């Protein structure tokens, strides 16, 4: 039980928990405020955006009138959150959920907050301050059928209070207060519409949908097949990843937010509400380890479908609906704790990043192993991609970290091109892929020669970041994970040791030691830390892997979620949240250890 | 001549529906006629949309036949006269048909007298449909004028 704190109106990133419905995600702070919700979809404009501007962003506040402490957890096996708020006079339990649609006329999107009196009496106040279009529009609030409704253009939200006091309209918001006594139950419902009239649900249906939502999540969790160590952390990661799956298309968003900073007050603020094909191999392996064959198949199909327009090139990122436009712009918001600019869109979309092909072919190989082959159309398109790799691997690129400095010959990019050709040849040998395998083998050998000649430092006994920069980069760990070479080859053993020695602070690994074209510093990258665990496991250094894994699992927030980065000095979460890649890397690291121990 | 009204009614409804949908995509209105009509017969969203489109085309035909009857009585027709009929039709729809009559017959449409009860309610459209966005009336007028002009034009061509 902690007393929630805010700095200049901003909760620590680790104070957030995520709830969602497979279309959008809301972030609930430990103090009961919902500071982030994009409607109708994850990549739509925010309606609650206080996360990025405490004054103008809008939020849904719900908290006791008196000083309070809070404790919370997810309802077992679900993405439904329970927060207990305790004051000197009593305590209340708030259950937060984005409900899943059931049969019957449900709202387009529905956020439910059920408040139960647990003990004593607690005076509770709530305030809904919707700000459409990332805070640009303070909506007009009217009453429809007794329900206060805020509307702007295509979008509208209504607030229904069931036993939570009368809703009072005022400029820019809808407020209420009530006293929760032990045994009492109240319910606040945010009903949202997009391009249609609002649906105003009755309480009985809301409560039934909430129960059905809990049942649905439990059923999904019970279907997971993971049987290994760190089960709780793996299951929570699976549930977090499921929140990032955009159900209408099968795409998987990298994170639920935009512009949470990699450095407080800095400019490293990016929009992660897109799907990165790069994550495909990590995703496929994680999904298959979790027994999510359906999601794996859907994601891979979505990926090949989305990249159809740019074939044989695979773009760095795609919108969740498969579109390629992601023009980057800055919003007039102050940013999380003054971290500006607040960006929407992502300029990395137009970069060249060659490593993506390795991850794509690795994912294809994983799926082929699981399914016993590849769909004929997919195989034909993948063969075209492999030929493209043969044509482009000599080019410099922006690398996996999407640096904004000049393109370079990044070692990991070349290695993943080699991995792409390795997988293609293996798939061809199995009869799953047809193409000019002689050329694929020839180019694979040339890439290998380039890397071994230009990208290895005898002095450092390690591969280096690029052919022009004699520094370390944690992305080199992916050479082990992607099986660029035998995991226990002397050069890969040396590289893993060097990453631990030079880039790690305790259990936390930084991405690189070189430049990236941006001002300032960033925290340690959690995915890299879990990659180190997996690299140890693949190299059969299991004691080191397990020790590191224990430490990293202990760094999750109180509900088991991770951001993109952690500040090694303060332990503070940094970057977008919850971060899919961090959770993917956790699942794969745990599965690798389980596999090695088996 | 009646075939002109039938073909015009279908073509006019296609144009009207397309214009309303485009306005919705452009953020000018939250009006969704197929959704409103369909939810009168089913609570299932997908079926409601399908039923709503069917009902909308049926009503489009019925109104075209009403136009046709009036054209026959006054022995005049044409694009301009059809457009005037469409204008009147839109004003009638916004002020009485959807605002007053639809909530009365729609089992899930809220009124100003309703509080949350045992069944989900749809947000009522309000006078001149302004609850669904302030530009809804303008959009509705333009769409219905186009519909009327097409019906009037086809009746004239067939005559």
Image (spheres, coloured by chain):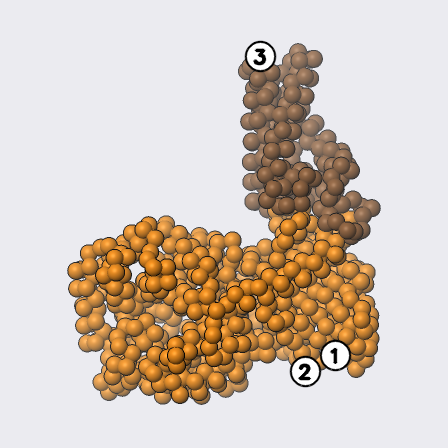
Chain colours: A orange, B brown
Q: Are marks 1 and 3 in contact (CB under 8 Å)?
A: no
Viewer-nearest residue: A426 or A408:
A426
- Asked whether A455 or B121 is in front, the reply is B121
Q: Nearer the viewer, mark 2 or mark 3?
A: 2
Q: Residue A377: x percent and y percent?
A: 33, 50
Q: Which residue is mark 2?
A: A1
Q: Residue at the location (34% across, 69% down)?
A: A399
Classify mark 2: helix, strand or loop.
Answer: loop
Q: Horizontally, is A315 left or right of A60 in the view?
A: left
Is disc 1 surrounded by few (<14), some (14 to 19) or many (20+) residues within 10 Å?
many
Per the image, the residue denoted by label 3 is: B159
Q: Are the residues tagged 2 and 1 within 8 Å (C-beta)?
A: yes
Residue A86's label in the rendered image is 1
Determine whether, in the image, residue A421 is placed left or right of residue A282: left
Question: Residue under mark 2: which chain is it in?
Answer: A
* Label 2: few (<14), some (14–19) or many (≥20) C-alpha neighbours in 10 Å: few
Q: Is residue A503 left or right of residue A385?
A: right
- Parent chain of label 3: B
- Give the structural element (helix, strand or loop) at label 1: strand
Q: Can you see residue A41?
A: yes
Measured in 3D between alpha carbons, the distance from the residue under mark 2 to the one under mark 1, in whole angstroms, is 9 Å
Q: Are tags 1 and 3 found on a single chain? A: no
């Amino acid at each position: 039980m902690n007393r929630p704190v805010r700095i200049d109106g901003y909760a620590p990133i680790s104070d957030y928990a995520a709830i969602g419905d497979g279309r959008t995600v809301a972030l609930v702070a430990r103090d009961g405020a919902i500071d982030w919700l994009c409607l109708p979809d994850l990549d739509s404009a925010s309606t609650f955006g206080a996360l990025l501007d405490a004054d103008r962003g809008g939020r849904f506040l719900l908290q006791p009138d008196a000083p309070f402490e809070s404790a919370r957890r997810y309802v077992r096996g679900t993405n439904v959150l329970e927060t207990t708020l305790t004051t000197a006079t009593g305590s209340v339990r708030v259950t937060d959920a984005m409900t899943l649609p059931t049969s019957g006329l449900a709202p387009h999107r529905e956020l439910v907050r059920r408040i139960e009196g647990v003990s004593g009496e607690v005076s509770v106040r709530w305030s809904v301050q919707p700000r459409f279009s990332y805070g640009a529009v303070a909506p007009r609030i009217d009453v429809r059928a007794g329900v206060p409704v805020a509307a702007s253009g295509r979008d509208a939200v209504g607030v229904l209070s069931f036993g939570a006091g009368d809703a009072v309209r005022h400029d820019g918001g809808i407020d209420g207060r009530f006293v929760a006594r032990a045994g009492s139950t109240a319910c606040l419902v945010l009903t949202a519409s997009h391009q249609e009239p609002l649906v105003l649900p009755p309480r009985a249906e809301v409560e039934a949908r909430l129960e059905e939502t809990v049942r649905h999540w439990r059923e999904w969790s019970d279907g997971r097949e993971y049987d290994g160590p760190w089960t709780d952390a793996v299951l929570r990661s699976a549930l977090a990843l499921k929140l990032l799956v955009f159900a209408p298309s099968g795409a998987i968003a990298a994170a639920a937010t935009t512009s949470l900073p990699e450095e407080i007050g800095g400019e490293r603020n990016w929009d992660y509400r897109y799907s990165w094909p790069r994550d495909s191999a990590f995703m496929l392996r994680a999904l298959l380890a979790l027994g999510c064959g359906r999601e794996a198949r859907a994601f891979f199909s979505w990926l090949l479908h989305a990249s159809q327009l740019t074939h044989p090139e695979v773009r760095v990122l795609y919108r969740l609906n498969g579109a390629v436009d992601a023009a980057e712009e800055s919003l007039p918001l102050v940013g999380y704790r003054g971290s500006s600019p607040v960006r929407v869109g992502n300029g990395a979309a137009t970069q060249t990043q060659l490593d993506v092909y390795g991850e794509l072919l690795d994912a294809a190989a994983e799926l082929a192993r699981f399914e016993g082959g590849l769909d004929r159309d997919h195989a034909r398109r993948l063969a075209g991609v492999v030929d493209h790799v043969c044509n482009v691997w000599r080019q410099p690129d922006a690398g996996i970290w999407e640096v904004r400095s000049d393109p370079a010959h990044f070692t990991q990019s070349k290695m993943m091109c080699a991995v792409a050709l390795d997988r293609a040849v293996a798939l061809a040998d199995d009869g799953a892929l047809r193409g000019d395998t002689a050329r694929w083998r020839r180019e694979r050998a040339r890439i290998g020669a380039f890397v071994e000649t230009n990208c290895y430092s005898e002095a450092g006994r390690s591969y280096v970041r690029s052919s022009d920069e004699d520094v370390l980069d944690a992305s080199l760990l992916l050479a082990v994970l992607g099986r660029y070479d035998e995991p226990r080859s002397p050069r890969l053993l040396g590289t893993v040791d060097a990453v631990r020695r030079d880039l790690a602070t305790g259990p936390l690994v930084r991405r690189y030691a070189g430049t990236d074209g941006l001002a300032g510093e960033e925290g340690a990258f959690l995915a890299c830390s879990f990659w180190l665990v997996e690299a140890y496991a693949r190299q059969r250094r299991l004691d080191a892997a397990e020790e590191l894994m224990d430490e990293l699992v202990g760094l999750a927030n109180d509900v088991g979620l991770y951001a993109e980065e952690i500040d090694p000095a303060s332990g503070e979460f940094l970057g977008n949240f919850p971060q899919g890649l961090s959770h993917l890397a956790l699942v794969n690291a745990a599965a690798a250890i389980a596999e090695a121990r088996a | 001549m009646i075939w002109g009204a039938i073909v015009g009614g279908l073509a006019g409804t296609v144009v009207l529906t397309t214009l309303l949908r485009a306005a919705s995509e452009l953020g000018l209105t939250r009006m969704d006629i197929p959704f409103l009509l369909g939810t009168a017969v089913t609570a299932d969203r997908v079926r409601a949309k399908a039923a709503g489109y069917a009902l909308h085309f049926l009503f489009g035909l019925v109104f075209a036949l009403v136009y046709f009857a009036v054209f026959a009585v006054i022995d005049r027709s044409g694009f301009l006269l059809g457009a005037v009929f469409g204008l009147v039709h839109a004003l009638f729809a916004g002020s009485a048909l959807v605002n007053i009559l639809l909530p009365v017959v729609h089992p899930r449409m809220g009124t100003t007298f309703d509080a949350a009860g045992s069944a989900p309610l749809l947000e009522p459209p309000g006078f001149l449909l302004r609850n669904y966005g302030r530009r809804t009336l303008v959009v509705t007028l333009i769409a219905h004028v186009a519909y009327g002009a097409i019906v009037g034009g086809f009746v004239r061509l067939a005559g």
